Image: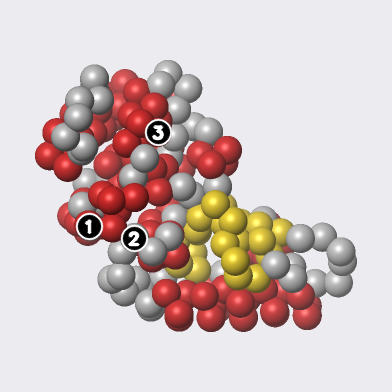
Amino acid sequence: MDKADILDRLNKMDMEAFSTIDNDEQYRIVIVGGSGLVLLDTITRATQDIDTLDASPEIRHLLAKYDANLLVSAYVNNFPYNYEDRLKPLSVGGRKIIFYTASLEDIVIAKLFSSRAVDRQDIISDEVLANIDWERLKHLALDEDEAKASALNEHSYKSFLCDYNEYVRRYGPDEELDV
């Protein structure tokens, strides 16, 4: 799926929710991973599905029909603890479902926690590197209440920290960030 495909599926999911759920409530979906980066216009590769970190229980039955899944929710501890404070609303849907993506920096942190090669490739794209707020990334990586607070354990965080430091060393801004 490219960006147009993802947006089309999200719109159709929203329309189905609107036509089948008879109440005045709105629900939310948080999109992350490769599909989140596609929606943030920072990668252009195709993605096979729509990684959903969180979805209101009332609409979860619609996810599979539109190639969305909650499998990534098992890795919520890879996202900085307060990721919800930085959600980016998407300009799609809105009748019944409000769609969000995690911030670019939150997705980069989650992908640094991962050991998958495709995750590492995603975060070194020119667009990702050009759009990262390096100070925010540093805060999320090092603050006691962010990545460290969400890590499964101290070993997991230390491994992440090694990967983060290498990432900043190789791809970060030329000016020193005091990592």
| Residues at discs 3 and 1 in contact (Cβ within 8 Å) | no
Query: Is 45 placed above or below 161 here?
Result: below
Q: Position of residue 9 (x, y in %)?
A: 54, 78
Total marks shown come to 3
The amino acid type of the residue labelled 1 equals Ser
Closer-to-camera residue (126/11):
126
Q: CA distance from mark 3 to mark 2?
A: 17 Å
Question: Which is nearer the N-term, disc 3 or disc 2?
Answer: 2
Picture disc at residue 125: 1
State how the image is colored. Answer: secondary structure
Q: Work out which quarter of the rendered image holds the C terminus and state it.
A: top left
Q: CA distance from mark 3 to mark 1?
A: 18 Å
Q: Which residue is mark 2?
A: 42
The secondary structure type at the circle numbered 2 is loop
- Determine which quarter of the picture holds residue 58: bottom right
Q: Residue at x 12, y 39 (%)?
A: 170
Taking the image as shown, residue 166 lies to the left or right of residue 7, namely left
